[in-house]
Amino acid sequence: REDIVNVLMHEIGKNRPDAEAEFDRTMQFIEKTIDYIKNSNEFGSGWDASNGPTRLFLSRAAIGVVLCLGPYNYPLNETYATLIPALLMGNVAVLKIPTVGGLAHLLTIEAFAKALPPGTINFISGSGRVTMPPLMESGKIDSLAFIGGSNAADKLIKAHPEPHRLKVFLQLEAKNMGVYLPDLFESGGDDLDRVIKETITGTLSYNGQRCTALKLLFVPKAHSEQFATMLAKKIESLSVGLPWESTDSKFSQITPLPYQGRVDYMKSLISDAVEKGAKILNKNGGKVVGEGVNGGESTLMVPALLYPVTPDMKVYEEEQFGPVIPIAPYDSLDEIIRYSREGKYGQQVSIFTSSNKETSAELIDHFSTVFGKININSQCGRSPDTCPFSGRRSSAMGVMSVMHALHEFSIPTVVSYKDVGNNDELVKGIEAHSKFMQAAF
């Protein structure tokens, strides 16, 4: 645990509490998955005699060879949330070690080697653009488990000679909205303070490098400046530093981005927005701490709160995946509904309100055909792991959870016979010799 936590801190800039949480949640996910298999009747529960003379034995069987590609931001948790269910269902796995965030996997190779038969899991390193196309072009990959960008996913799928037979599981980009209703500001007080805190966590946990982060905040125009000012002050109070640094037992809340390319992209979004009329409201917003000192480079970027953000700005549509917080004032809920309908992504949305039940219900009815999860007065997130984590459009294909991941990497398989003649006795003998029918989960 400590070795992997240290790797997560030093390689991808995750602070200690978040690195520890990633490791612990991964172990909990694995334990819950194994418990589900043991206690479920989906994995060989005997014969079903409820269909007249027809007898049915149902279990789940492996798909074949699963190619797993995980992200840099949660290299252990999100990758193993697909890898472990795939292995438990009997598949052979090929794991592409990410160029950034790959060291955690190097620490697990020996553990896998001790626990699994040779060839069960195979690790590949190197450039994904170089190593992945030949694998897909071989036609020997039966299932693709990919967490990353939609463009890369499309290219991989198209590279397969028979894409119709490729079982695909994708978790991709998102542009999750935070929608703030007017009644929230009319009530003020504790409700608004609580929402501000939730917004900070939703936008800047792990520097905003989460597909589930809040990435565009829609605030009523009449209250948008007040909200932006309050949020800016809260951002200025966050501690900025290295992942392992702490003051009074509190670790840095804003930490370095994992590589220079992320900094460059954040700068490009900020510059575009400022050129088109937005302002950076928080002190030192967008500044890179230590940049240029003694000729050195740095990726420790202070978050930038952009206000007001308008539809002509790149950050209005593009997923920033980093410490840039755009606030878009709105006049009518129609603007928000239109954005959700016409947008490219469909993962999650958060609605913040104090008491407006009717409008909240109306939004939920609209959003229920657009997003996989609708949050009320809370940030977007994947947890709990027993909850289906889904999405629409260019945000996802397939569902992740303790139960659903097992389904994604297996096929329901039936053995059937009619209870006539000596079939019953015959099948009992077959069952006694069948590894599939006696699989001890």
Image (tube, grey):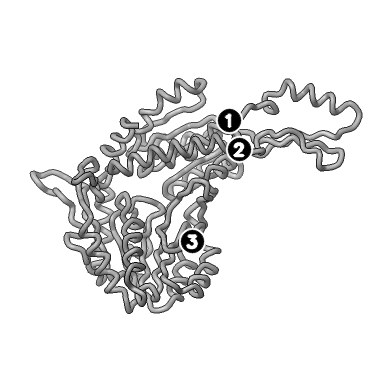
Q: Quadrant of the C terminus?
A: top right
Identify the element where label 2 is drawn.
strand
Q: Of the two numbered discs 3 and 2 on the same chain, state the one appearing first in sequence.
A: 3
Identify the element where label 3 is drawn.
strand
Dot 3 alpha-carbon crowd within 10 angstroms: few under 14, some 14 to 19, many 20 or more? some
How far apart marks 2 and 1 lie (CA) works out to 8 Å
Identify the element where label 1 is drawn.
loop
Q: Residue at x 44, y 69 (%)?
A: 339
Quadrant in which residue 236 is drawn = bottom left
Say what amino acid the circle numbered 1 marks: Gly
Whether tag 2 and tag 1 are in contact, CB under 8 A, the answer is yes
Say what amino acid the circle numbered 2 marks: Ser
Vertically, is 273 above or below 372?
below
Dot 2 alpha-carbon crowd within 10 angstroms: few under 14, some 14 to 19, many 20 or more? many
Nearest to viewer (mark 3 / mark 2): 3
How far apart marks 3 and 2 lie (CA) works out to 28 Å
Q: Residue at x 35, y 35 (%)?
A: 102
Residues 342 and 34: in front is 34
Check residue 90 in the rendering and tell me which mark sits there, or answer none: 1
Q: Which residue is mark 3?
A: 374
Quadrant in which residue 379 is drawn = bottom left
